[in-house]
Amino acid sequence: MSSANTQAKASQLVSAIIEPGSTIGILGGGQLGRMLTLAATPLGYRCVTLDPTPDSPCGQIARQVIAAYDDVEAARELAGSCDVVTYEFENVDAGVAALLEQESYVPQGSKLLYTTQHRLREKRAIEAAGVPVAPYREVTSAGSMQQAVEELGLPCVLKTVMGGYDGKGQRVIRHLEEVQAAYEELNTAGVGLVLESFVPFQCEISVVAARSTKGEVRTFPPAENIHVNNILHASIVPARVSEELQARAEQLAAQLIEGLDAVGLLAVEMFVTKAGEIYVNELAPRPHNSGHYTMDACATSQFEQHIRAICGLPLADPRLVTPVVMVNILGEHMEEVLKLLTSTASQTATEKVIPKLHLYGKSESKNGRKMGHVNLLCQDTEAAMQWIEQTNIWRNH
Ligand code: AMP
């Protein structure tokens, strides 16, 4: 297809309805791509993914273009075989994003990727949407670091503005003697730094919001997130905060997704203080681990909602049907999970907890690697927390 034609294709299709039978391209073939494919399939869509690893979790159930994420020719091949393109991770290469926007239909655009790839841009965008973030200062030199510490006070958290995930690229500073070491350690990345006030949070929650190409917005109920070693361990829904606070969290997420003019999913991670204040910590413009509970516990999953949003279909009912606790399965948990799966005694759901297992098809099971999750459907989330305690699987936590 010539470039003029493909540009015309892109502009004509803006906010078009992508009908069942069409092909959805997914940049990234990990578990999020796999679960998007699992949700798109019963709606009648086909999926094709681009991922460098053969037999990726998504490539096991969708056609896969095997190539590096920054391979522009491969992205062109993906674009050529799809009616709409989405992504399952936020670090999409700028060149690939630009090509896809030119030559295919990417309703999510690349502006939000640009914003969420960088903590300072992200914080400024959140504030511009009228939503609170913890006080912060840009740090550009040892001098500005000292000044930022004086202004914000201790404790505080120093973070690299790019490339950090699962707690990497950040240091909590509790004493003045730690300031210089933290600065010198993180400044080596050469990507810029931001200093934030440490929020003495009562709990961390997240809301997954969806906005369709037609501008319709729906939000999922907040999940209360428990992290272990900076990796999400469990999400508890309903979150153990007041209903008023849950409603406010959903309202803030809706305000953000509209303010950012985003299409598709936006996961909003928040801190909740004892006084009931909410501060947004981070955004992810994609399906989120803390939204996996929706697969079994909501009328619609986050993955189906994303497909609907980018295809211009009406958004579906996100309501919670049952209390649930989602618990992640990491590499170190796999042996015990497989024992449980293959033991006949454990196949009967208990009266109080119904476990629903999701494995991602990853062959290599490394420590800390996300291999799957279990959604524990329950009458009350305490019973599900006890189930987690009582199995041997997460005993090291
Ligand atoms: P992040 O990479 O920003 O998601 O941070 C990872 C984790 O570090 C969060 O989930 C929090 O538990 C903790 N954390 C990050 N920033 C702050 C902060 N400003 N105050 C308190 N805890 C924080």
Image: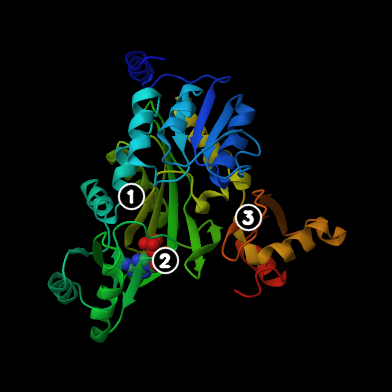
Percent coordinates x, y for residue 17 in the rendering: 45, 19
Distance between the alpha carbons at the discs numbered 1 and 2: 15 Å
Q: Which residue is drawn at 49% across and 61% down?
A: 225
Q: Image quarter for residue 347? A: bottom right
Q: Name the residue under label 1.
A: 117
Q: Is residue 350 visible?
A: no
Q: Callout 3, which amino acid?
A: His
Q: Which of marks 3 and 1 is nearer the N terminus?
A: 1
Q: Callout 1, which amino acid?
A: Gln
* Colour setup of the view: rainbow
Q: Which residue is drawn at 32% across and 70% down?
A: 199
Q: Which of marks 2 and 3 is nearer the N terminus?
A: 2
Label 2 Cα crowd, 10 Å radius (few <14 / some 14-19 / many 20+): few
In the image, farthest residue toward the right: 344
Q: Mark 3 points at which residue?
A: 373
As drawn, is 100 to the left or to the right of 53?
left
Whether residues under marks 3 and 1 lie with C-beta atoms below 8 angstroms apart, the answer is no
Asked if the beta carbon under badge 2 is closer than 8 A to the nearest atom of ligand 1, the reply is yes
On the rendering, which quadrant does ligand 1 occupy? Answer: bottom left
Q: Residue at x 38, y 36 (%)?
A: 96
Label 3 or label 1, whichever lies nearer to me, is 1
Label 2 or label 3, whichever lies nearer to me, is 2
Under circle 3, the secondary element is strand
Percent coordinates x, y for residue 369 in the rendering: 57, 60
Distance between the alpha carbons at the discs numbered 3 and 1: 26 Å
Label 1 Cα crowd, 10 Å radius (few <14 / some 14-19 / many 20+): many
Q: Nearer the viewer, residue 276 or 119?
A: 119
Under circle 2, the secondary element is loop
Q: Examine the rendered structure and indicate whether residue 112 appears above or below residue 207.
A: above
Distance between the alpha carbons at the discs numbered 2 and 3: 20 Å
Q: Callout 2, which amino acid?
A: Gly
Q: Mark 2 points at which residue?
A: 167
